Amino acid sequence: MQFSKIIITRPQTQNIKLQKRLSKMFLEHQINVPVISLPLIEIVSIEQEGLAQSMHHALLHAKWVSFVSPNAFLMSNQLLTKHGLKWPSHLRVAVVGGGSEQSIIDAGISFQEIVKPTDSGAWDSEGLWQALQKAQSEWQDCRMVMIHGEGGRNFLAEHLKEAGAHIEDFSVYQRQGLSINHSAWKLLDPTHSSLWVFNSSQAGDFLASRLSELEIDLNFLRHDTAIVSHPRIYEKIHELGFGSIQMIEPGDEELMKTIFQLCKTAL
């Protein structure tokens, strides 16, 4: 199948990075497919000074800090920096996957250790809990700060509490659906097949909602292909009626390889 465009649906900052990588790869291999940024989820930071001070105090007394996503780290780092606060260097860090780890590395923040699931196929809360049990056998009275956006699953927190850990959690951003007034919607072309990239089931919810508001029939998606990186995302995207869905291992290297293969096959 030949695609008229590739539509990436991450928050804008992450979309920009991915867009640059794809454009470079396409230029090197003479693939002429436009990459469109449709940031279905907008990340809105929470920047109150009181939140920054409370979070920093908790971090000073914790042994661990966990980031549920790259945005959790980026927004909390932005929050602390804005109010003149620094990350305590004694902390051990728990992250779900490679994206969060890379965000920390790119920011140049030094922590004692970063723990994530070793298998990219287990880059989720369940996989992280298994990795943490290997990293530390005893959790009784251990203090962990959990940083995330508003809402979301609490699988890891529940299991840590059952193991005796003390949890303090902080929401540092909100997720909002992309406004129907955003110019990116005008780039959709329901008459031609597109390749979509999803990293979040919530992005699927926002897509369905916004297409309804724009009075665009979801049926056009039956001609489109989606790439997803987790069974929960697969379930949501399947509900939307995509004609083809390809599930891959999490991580941008696997994503780049898959997009390359699909686009080369279509030539």
Image (spheres, grey):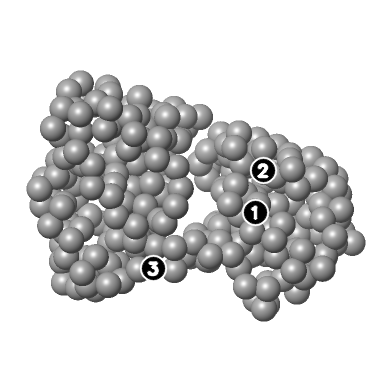
- State which tag comes first along the sequence, 3 or 1: 3
Quarter occupied by residue 126: top left
Disc 2 secondary structure class: helix
Residue 180: percent from the left, percent from the top? 68, 73
Disc 1 secondary structure class: helix
- State which tag comes first along the sequence, 3 or 2: 3
Q: Name the residue under label 3.
A: 45
- Circle 2 residues within 10 Å: few <14, some 14–19, many ≥20: some
Residue 174: percent from the left, percent from the top? 44, 63
Quarter occupied by residue 142: top left
**Given the image, on which type of amino acid does mark 3 rest?**
Ser
Distance between the Cα atoms at labels 3 and 2?
26 Å
Q: Which residue is drawn at 34% across and 61% down?
A: 172
Q: Is residue 19 visible?
A: no
Q: In this view, does 224 lie to the left or right of 258?
A: right
The quadrant in which the N terminus is found is top right
Q: Mark 2 points at which residue?
A: 236
Name the one closer to the observer, 56 or 21: 56
- Circle 1 residues within 10 Å: few <14, some 14–19, many ≥20: some
Distance between the Cα atoms at labels 3 and 1?
21 Å
Name the one closer to the observer, 29 or 7: 7
Mark 3 touches mark 2? (CB < 8 Å): no
Residue 236: percent from the left, percent from the top? 67, 43
Q: Mark 1 points at which residue?
A: 205
**Given the image, on which type of amino acid does mark 2 rest?**
Lys
| Image mark for residue 13 | none
- Circle 3 residues within 10 Å: few <14, some 14–19, many ≥20: some
Q: In this view, does 146 lie to the left or right of 262?
A: left
Distance between the Cα atoms at labels 2 and 1?
8 Å
Name the one closer to the observer, 206 or 5: 206
Quarter occupied by residue 227: top right
Q: Against 116, is 65 above or below? A: below
